[in-house]
Image: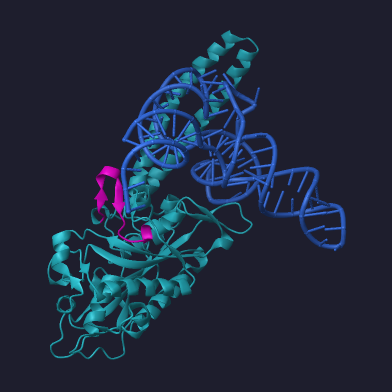
Chain colours: A cyan, B blue
Amino acid sequence: MLQANTIRQEKERIIAGLKKRHFQDLDVVDRILALDDDRRKFQAAGDDIQAEINRLSKQIGDLFKSGKAADAAALKDQVAAHKEQLKTVLEDQESTAVQLEELLISVPNIPHESVPAGRTPEDNEVFQDWTKPMPDLPKDAKPHWELAEDHGIIDFPTGVKITGAGFPLYRGKGAILQRALINFFLDEARAAGFEEIQPPLMVNADSARATGQLPDKEGQMYYVEKDDLYLIPTAEVPVTNIYRDVILEEKDLPIKLTGYTPCFRREAGAYGKDVRGLNRVHQFDKVEIVILDHPERSYETLDMMLNHVRGLLDKLELPYRILRLCGGDMGFTSALTYDFEVWSAAQERWLEVSSVSNFETFQSHRMKLRYRPENEKKTQLTHTLNGSALALARIVAALLENNQDSFGIRVPEALHRYTGFDRIP
RNA sequence: GGAGAGUUGGCCGAGUGGUCGAAGGCGCACGCCUGGAAAGCGUGUAACCGGCAAAACCGGUUCAAGGGUUCGAAUCCCUUACUCUCCGCCA
């Protein structure tokens, strides 16, 4: 969430940014500034009254001690009058603050200057295209859900029986391939200097709010009412929240974390051929990378994360392209997002497998994640970044489809030491 | 799940109505001492909001969270969360 101060100081930039997002309610900016002014007026008034009450209370104490109870009683009446006054001021301040908070939380992050204009996914900029040849598939090439069934490695119907649609059941080499990919991704992240985290898979509302899933994506998360907990839609939530309400030292930055978790997403209302098989599921595995870094170098860090993901896809020998999301298609909390898409040869479409974003201070403000600059007293908000590195289900879809031949499926070499086999079946 | 005890600053810990943003210790920073270090000595060491664009300074808030009693609450009362101990259950 943006800070009222930032909006006051950089009003023009904020409005331009909101326009780029095609955010409708532009005069929310003026309403925020007006409420913020009110809030500060109420606070100044309240502080003055409270200071007077504090002063009088001290006097009363002194009077009692020196045995002048009658004088004290007169002052008590004064305090009582001030308290009445204070009560209404505090009520006004509180309701103003609540309204201000509601407005602030409704405002999305401001896009980075490099974010392309545009409204829909079609307007996203192809930041890096695939220039090498595409896989040459046999005439009777099959989509991954047929391949998976043929080779008995993913059992969709039994997943439906046990749980419901969108909960795939992996068997035999299919299950091993999952494990192999997870270990491969984790090892690569560790080699790149990320600390491995194994976080809780459920989070409380405070955590979901801090990273921005609440209130924006409430309907996307599975919610356990009895215990008031949410199943995580991504490791980003528990991993970033490690540093909620923390003040770091400047020298501690950057902090680089990685974690594998299953991810749970309700994906309500999604049906049809675009979501068949592994294209969109309610539970999938993902290795996430999270970085907390200094505001001055967060965009270099974003580039570094891009390189990390490129390396993974290169090693998996998958054709991919990178999109720079346009203002209208970016997530609510992000300032700049790159999506990685792999080519799914049998379906002849691109599948999103990674989303790498810089949130600047949007999450850290909600999260109260700060750092103390060297030799300075005042704390600053840290920048937070994260990316998938990588999400499994669609990677598996592409691996199966792109590497099929008339005998089965070839496993890319980088995975052999993890799978223990080089072909399916 | 049942019973009991707790929750105070970066950490440990004192504090049962005013002199408490909070003793003391540890840690950390700076200085003295030293050839250099350790030890010792001294000084300092929370966050947030507002006045204010910033610094100095001033005001306000914060002793798990929220509410209440009181002129005045870390301290008394209520609610909630969490932690620990014992019992029960258990991968």
Residue A192 locus on image (x, y percent): 47, 74
Camera-nearest residue between A197 and A289: A197
Residue A403 locus on image (x, y percent): 24, 85
Camera-nearest residue between A1 and A148: A148
**Residue A229 in the figure: left or right of residue A385:** left
Q: Residue at x 18, y 78 (%)?
A: A144
Q: Is residue A351 visible?
A: no
Q: Is residue A406 above or below residue A169?
A: below
Q: Residue at x 17, y 71 (%)?
A: A277
Instruction: Look at the image and give the residue range highlighted in magenta.
Output: A221-237
Q: How many marks?
A: 0
Q: Is residue A141 above or below residue A221?
A: below
**Residue A94 in the figure: left or right of residue A140:** right
Camera-nearest residue between A344 and A215: A344
Residue B66 locus on image (x, y percent): 40, 33
Q: Residue at x 58, y 58 (%)?
A: A373
Q: Is residue A44 above or below residue B72?
A: below
